[in-house]
Every structure is written in structure tokens, then in C-alpha cells.
Image: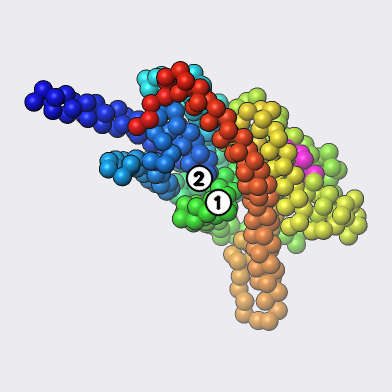
Amino acid sequence: MILEEHLETTVKVHDQQLHRRVDLLLRTGKLLVESLADTNRIVRNMKRTAAYLGIPEEKLHINVSFTMLMVNVSDGDYSFTKFQRIEGHGVNMTAISEVSKLSWRAIENDYTLDQYEEELEKIRTKKRNYTPLQVAIGAGFACGGFCIQFGCDWMAFLYASIAAIIGMRVRQKCNESGLNHYMGIAISAFIATMIAWASTFLPGEWTNTPWHPLLACALFIVPGVPLINFVDDMLDNYIQVGIVRAVNTLLMVAAMAFGIAFAVKLCSIADFFPTISMVPHHAYWEYALAAAISAMGFSMIFNIQRRLLWVVAIGGILAVCTRNFVNLGPSTDNIGLDMGLVIGSFAGSVLVSLIAIKAVHWFHVPNHVLTIPSVIPMIPGVLMYRMLFGLINMNVQSIDQVTPLMKAIESGVNSGLVIMCIALGVAIPNIFGRKYIASSKNKRLAAILKERRARGKFVEW
């Protein structure tokens, strides 16, 4: 009888310990999902955390979705499953980086469960690196940098920045109020477009490019991280999660387009593209400066560590200058290879991604922390707006009106190809390089676990 009671007590303690370990594992995964890490990284980090917690990989089963996490621990005789709901999503590159470091640190330093839980909670509750106002200003100047990319002068850069700053603050207030996420995007895009349109009534001698701010003022909404994660997940064979990310990206773009279209119709803004020169006329140094500003601005939205701002600025310069050199050429009276925007965008993103594979070891951060903000300045805003304005003003009643519609469709196809090439350029080198990086990390993990076993600190469940 005493023996049975002792066995029952031992089983209960065992179950309680396992429940707590699985709970910590799920909370770790939840933080990564909510910070918009790609699925491959979520699974890798959770498996490494499970190794620290003493849960063997062969007994561990992880299922990741956009709104739910599931972990099952099973050895054939005993099975335990627990779910964790995902509350919300917002890019937080600092949290992604710190969770990765915590999983290694916990193994190397033999953290107790209490120590690990305390460190994880610190990451979850840590204040963001930038205040909401700083983020809004960064996002505003990022849109101003886009405006320079599209060919505006520096006064129009200021107009676009002011419109985007106000639009970003509106979006932040909508999020804080608990308003529907997509409705907040539509409202902020509408407000930013209205302010950019109002700037066209300012004295004409102040700027030679008064309409350009309309092209860039709402681009702080561009879902760059969900888009690249979608491509990553699809290539990594996480098809279901990838499809959900793709749908979420499309809904964000649709909400943004709705806000812009509503402002265009309300203000009766005519198609101003015939008045805009599509031939680049800025010097390379101006494009480089604009790219650096945009990359740093989006880094603030993504909550990247302050010490890395100059790194992503250089990444943005490399990406845009490479894109321009491959894209431009004699046909536009420029120096370059004249191979087109699609190939140029792909080349710029591949170059940054290849450099980042090595740079992650210099700066000790995940690959996407460096690559995504660097390639964002290559987003083809002009093509996207050409398509949008073409569809808004669509009124095909005769054969003569078919050509503008076809141009709008062509712009839409080209912008889609450019965006997809940017995402592929970031993802493909990382996926191929991951094989070699993962191999070295697995060897390191095996060595550390072997040391823990030798010290008697490793107990499998």
C-alpha cells in the first residue's frame, strides 16, 4: 500500500514537471509566432528549447499555425498534448533575436526552470526600442525615402514624410483602441493620402514634383515581413501556414488599397501619371541616401536593436544601388546593365541575403533581422500605384480606352513579379545556406548536451 502511494505520488510529480516544461515550450513558441518569426525558425527554436527542457526530439511533436500552437510529447505508452492560442501579431525583431539567444544560454549555463521562465517573461514584457512617436517619425521618413526613389525632389520628400508620420500615428491610435486591424490600415492609408493630396495646393514654386508624395505616403503599411515569411514557409514546405500568411498579406494590401481608393474618389484625384517622368534623374548618391533612410525607418517599425541601424542602412544602399545598376542602362541614359527592374530587384535582394549569411555571425542576430529592412526600399511603389489608379479610373466604353486598362494590368503584373523576386532573393540563399548553418549548430548543440549529461544536469522526460 505504501509502495503504491509512493508510486502514485512520483507519477503526479512527474506529470506536473512535464506539464510545466511543455507550458514553457509553448510560451516560447507563442512569443516567436506573435513576433512574426518564420515557421522554420519557430520550430528550430522550440526544438532547441525542448532539448534544454530535457524533452527528447524523437518524443516531441510540434504543430505551428497562424493562430494556434500544439505540442505533443509521446513515447508510445504515455502521451501528453497541450495547445496555446496566439493572441496577436506584430513584428518584433528584438524579441526573435533574444529568444534565440536565451535558448542557447539556458543550455550552456544550466538554467533552472524558474530562471528560464523569468528570462522569457523579461523578453515578453520588455519595452520596445523606440517610442510610438519615434516609430511614426521613422516610418514617415522611410516613406519620404521611397518618394526620392520614385523621382521626387527633397521638398516633396518632406511632404510625403509629414503625410506618412500622421498616417502612422493614426494607425497606432487605431491599434491601441482595439479597432479591427484591417480597418485601421484602411483609415491610416486614407488619412495619409488625403494629407498628401492637400500638399499639392501649396505654392508650386516650392517643389517641381507635387504629385509624388501621393505615391509614397502610405507605404509604411507595406507588409514586407509577412510577405517574405510566406515565401519562406512555402519553400520550407510549411504550406498551410504559408497560405494563411499569404491571405493575411493580401488582406493588408487590400485594406491599404481601399483607403487610398476612397481618398482618390472622394477628392476626385485625376490620373496624374502622364505628368510624372518615369526616367530616373537623381544621382546614385541620392538614391543611396534615400535607401538608407527607408531601411532605417522600417527597422524602427520592426523594433530592431539600435546598434544595427547603421548595418541595415548599408544593406539598403547595397540593395538599391545593385538594383539600379542591373535595372538601368543606356536606354535611360544611365550607367548599368539595362536588364530590367525584375532582374535588378532579384539581384539586389540576393546580394544582401548572401552577405547576411555571413554577417549574422558578426552581429549575432537572425538572418531576417538584417535582410528584410534592407530590401524593403526596393518595393515597386510606382507600379503598384499605376495599377491602382488604372483600375480606379477604369471606364472601358470604346476600343481607345482599352490601352490604359492594359497598362494598369501590365503594371500590376510587373509589380507582383518584382515583389516576388525580392522575396525569393531573400529566401533562397538563406534556405540553401541554412543547411550548412544548421549542421554546425546541431554539432554545437550535441556537444553542449553531452557536457550537461556529464555534469548530471540533463534529465530526459
Identify which residue, 162 or 6, lies in the foreground.
6
| Residue at 62 percent of width and 42 percent of height | 434
Q: Position of residue 237 (x, y in %)?
A: 52, 54
Q: Amino acid at mark 1?
A: Asp
Q: Which element carries disc 1, helix, strand or loop? A: loop
| Residue at 66 percent of width and 64 percent of height | 413
Can residue 423 be seen from the camera position used here? yes
- Left or right: where 5 falls relative to 197: left
Q: Position of residue 248 (x, y in %)?
A: 48, 52
Lower position in the chain sequence, tag 1 or tag 2: 2
Q: Which element carries disc 2, helix, strand or loop? A: helix
Q: Amino acid at mark 2?
A: Thr
Question: Is residue 234 a member of the stretch shown in magenta?
Answer: no
10 Å crowding of disc 1: few (<14), some (14-19), many (20+): some
Question: Which quarter of the rendering shows the N terminus?
Answer: top left
Q: Position of residue 73 (x, y in %)?
A: 34, 40
Q: Image height check: is 18 above or below 388?
A: above
- Left or right: where 159 falls relative to 246: right
Q: Position of residue 285 (x, y in %)?
A: 83, 38
Colouring convention used in this rendered image of the protein? rainbow
10 Å crowding of disc 2: few (<14), some (14-19), many (20+): many
| Residue at 76 percent of width and 56 percent of height | 343
| Residue at 65 percent of width and 41 percent of height | 436
Quote the CA–CA distance across marks 1 and 2.
8 Å
Q: Image height check: is 381 above or below 105?
A: below
User: Which residue is denoted by mark 1 in the rendering?
Assistant: 236
User: Which residue is denoted by mark 2 in the rendering?
Assistant: 39
Magenta residues, dominant SS class? helix
Question: Which quarter of the rendering shows the C terminus?
Answer: top left
- Kindly indicate whether the residue at mark 2 contacts the one at mark 1 (C-beta within 8 angstroms): yes
Part of the protein shown in magenta: 315-321
Identify which residue, 290 or 99, lies in the foreground.
99
